[in-house]
Amino acid sequence: MKRFTRDEIAQHVARDIPEGCYVNLGIGLPTLVANHLEASKEIFLHSENGILGMGPAPVPGEEDGDLINAGKQPVTLLTGGTYFHQADSFAMMRGGHLDICVLGAFQVSRTGDLANWHTGAPDAIPAVGGAMDLATGAKRVFVMMEHQTKTGESKIVGRCTYPLTGMGCVSRVYTDLAVIDITVEGLMVREMAPGLTLDELQSITGVPLKAA
Amino acid sequence: MNMNSAHLRCNENALDALQPTWLASASAADASPPRTRKEATMVCERAPGDSGLINKIFPDMSSAMAGIADGATVMISGFGSAGMPSALIDALIAQGAGDLTIVNNNAGNGETGLAALLAAGRVRKIICSFPRQTDSQVFDGLYRSGKIDLELTPQGNLAERIRAAGAGIGGFFTATGYGTQLAEGKETRLINGRHYVLESPIHADVALIKAWKADRWGNLIYRKAARNFGPIMAMAAKCTIAQVDHVVPLGELDPEVIVTPGIFVQRVVHVPGDSQ
């Protein structure tokens, strides 16, 4: 089965972000999206630590320890960008000012519930950071994840078995096999990996799918 | 009203093709952007001749005021005349929207600005902290004749209610007003031995604010004590329209001192000469 690469998943997300959007890219897989945004398209990247208008990684030697992203990696500021404190940064999320946030996930349910902060395992050390604020506050939540776990179980599920990050918050899921909208009518498949059929996709997905 | 033209913010129409969310656009009244852009496609397409640069600077007052509907809640910045966006208020009078709820610290002075809006009969209700002043005769007359509703709010509660709306807070407990007439009927709670009153956020459809300098992304700085309500009102409204004395090139405003980041500003109108 041909699967989209991580960079191809990121390309799909980047392609679907309209110009002028205020966007937060979560840590992990979503940070790849920044590498695929068209330079000619003005998109405002928000970083939870207090940056709007975040630019790409600096050239080697130009790193500034006071200018890092949510993943603690060095970044730059675009001309016109701004800095602000934590409460203002989270007011942007919680007040519904971000158009899109892109998050990774352990599981997404058919009703758009998101689980991405805690496996619930007894020995796991939970960490939530800004995930719940983003999931609840952004106007639209896009999820990027592998379609299946390493053992082949569907990560799109009827009901999340991991602890929730937010309820009914996910609008769209980008996986290595498909792009799926979560709608009131059900899960609508927008596109699939080359050669994959809807029946094949359905056979490895935990909940009913429809062609968009 | 949907005041987010594709040009100013991301392509809302395209995004609305997704699952309806809790933040779906309120209604369909359209606004005229300074330049047009094809709206219904997910991938943003540029209009012919469009440089593609995000530009929130509107070319004239009438386009900046388009889409304000009857019945709207409109926040107006200013403490007295400092920070009051006089040109925007005049434009709102000309635009014609009525049955408005106005949020301002005061209720108009003299015969111009907010007082003129009141005198024109456009305001159904005002939410403010200090309506009565030596020159608030327009409001005084309307209030005494029962032609305007007043929701009086302690000034700190007014500011925090506006801030709460912008930050997505559903309500907050404050000690101010407990046991007074202004807290009658409101939920209270005893917290660590002190009494608090539950206060609700104030959301707005539109904020009319005055700032000193803006760039094309809508980043703002203010001048002296004219800053007052501008930053929080910008956060609490669906569409924030800023009247500014100066439009500067992107990058001229120091990122360390920008007070209102452009994410909170949808439209900017250059009105030179109102301040220095």
Image (cartoon, grey):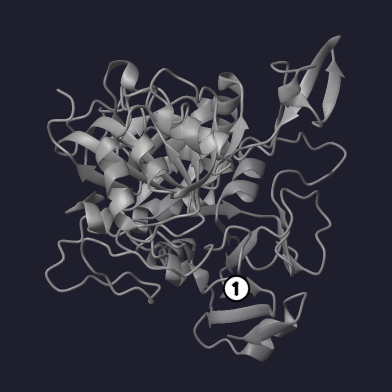
Q: What element carries label 1?
A: strand
Q: Can residue A58 be seen in this view?
A: no
Q: How crowded is mark 1: few (under 14 residues within 10 Å), some or many (20 or more)?
A: many
Residue found 26% across the figure and 50% down from its top: B56
Please name whichever residue, A48 or A139, is drawn nearer the observer in this view of the structure: A139
Please name whichever residue, B259 or B188, is drawn nearer the observer in this view of the structure: B188
On the image, the x and y values in percent for residue B67 come to 38, 61
Residue found 23% across the figure and 70% down from its top: B46
Please indicate whether residue A39 sits to the left or right of residue B22 in the image. left
The answer to whether residue B170 is above or below residue B182 is below
Q: In which quarter of the image is residue A161?
A: bottom right
On the image, the x and y values in percent for residue B260 come to 37, 32
Name the residue that disc number 1 marks.
A181
Q: Mark 1 lies on which chain?
A: A
The answer to whether residue A156 is above or below residue A121 is below
Assign the N terminus of chain A to one quadrant of the image: bottom right
Q: Is residue A119 visible?
A: yes
Q: Quadrant of residue A154?
A: bottom right
Q: What residue type is labelled 1?
A: Asp
The answer to whether residue B223 is above or below residue B55 is above
